Amino acid sequence: MTKPDAITQNLLAAVADLHDIPTGAYNLRLNGEGAGRRSTANIQIETKQDKPGIDIHIKPGTKNESVHIPVVLSQSGLTETVYNDFYIGENADVIIVAGCGIHNAGAEKAEHDGLHRFFVGANARVRYIEKHYGEGDGSGQRIMNPHTVAELAEGAYLEMETVQIKGVDSTIRRTDAILQAGSTLVIKEKIMTHGHQLAETHFNVEMNGAGASCSVSSRSVAAGKSRQIFCSNIVGNAPCSGHSECDGIIMDEAQISAIPEISANHSDASLIHEAAIGKIAGEQILKLQTLGLTEAEAEAQIISGFLK
């Protein structure tokens, strides 16, 4: 991989915490084209032949390895859809770091849509980190629409950390998961919107095996005139446990809608949903102001702690 320019370097640092070529397996996509790749003995990355995207094969038993697959767009007017499939072998234990950064300095929209499918083998453990970030002083929109599909075999564990903090004008985020016996899905989402931005999140989880469990949590801040919609549907078709939680801070003229749904189709399915939306308490700001912070600094500190 050749040394990226300053814009690309900044985006890679924001979405994948990369400041240099990563160790281990990686695949970098830049403005719709492959810009660098490395496979390892245990993690093979292959280009799809029928559509844009890659297949990532992780051998059974692979431990303490990672794969980075960031996407960067820095051309106004570019729209792409990418299809990535992950095949994680039995008893593997790996970290997958994705993420998309868009720098739009033009008048046309820049859009990245992606479908990630995870096939997690029996007793495998995966930590998946996905960050979305937008920047640029152009008038064109920065749009990202990620769709994740996960199939967890018996005893599998998938933890997803998804973060969208800045600069994305419109996003529809969807996650669909099917869990077999003894498998676990943990989803932690953090979103901040401002201006006239729109963020929709849709979670659909089916637990089909005894002992399956899931935890879906979303923390969000909506400022300006932005809008957020959170929808979750957890279905228990076997003895299982599930929890869905949405906590939102609303500011200015923003709007937040939380629509949690649970469906128990087995008498031993234990499902809980929670949702809370409110503004920052005035006493919290006053307390920080007594420590020397301005009102704006206090507000920023509270938001930072809430989304940490």
Image (cartoon, rainbow, N blue to C red):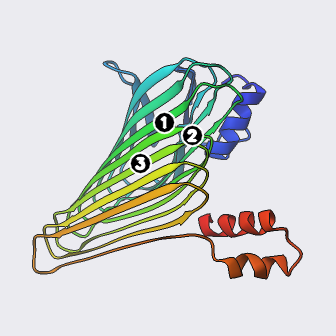
CA separation in Å, label 3 and label 2: 12 Å
Counting residues from the start of the chain, the first of labels 3 and 2 encountered is: 2
Residue occupying image coordinates x 45% and y 43%: 42
CA separation in Å, label 2 and label 1: 7 Å
Q: Secondary structure at mark 3?
A: strand
Quarter residue 281 falls in: bottom right
Are the residues tagged 2 and 1 within 8 Å (C-beta)? yes
Badge number at residue 200: 3
Badge 3: residue crowd in 10 Å (few <14, some 14–19, many ≥20): some
CA separation in Å, label 1 and label 3: 11 Å
Image position of 27 (left or right of 233)? right
Check the picture and name the quadrant holding the N terminus. Answer: top right
33 or 67: nearer the eye? 33
Badge 1: residue crowd in 10 Å (few <14, some 14–19, many ≥20): many
The residue under label 2 is: 168
**Residue 244 visible in the displayed image:** yes
Q: Amino acid at mark 3?
A: Glu
The residue under label 1 is: 144
**Picture layout, residue 7 above or below residue 134:** above
Q: Amino acid at mark 2?
A: Val
Q: Residue furthest right?
A: 292
Residue occupying image coordinates x 33% and y 57%: 231
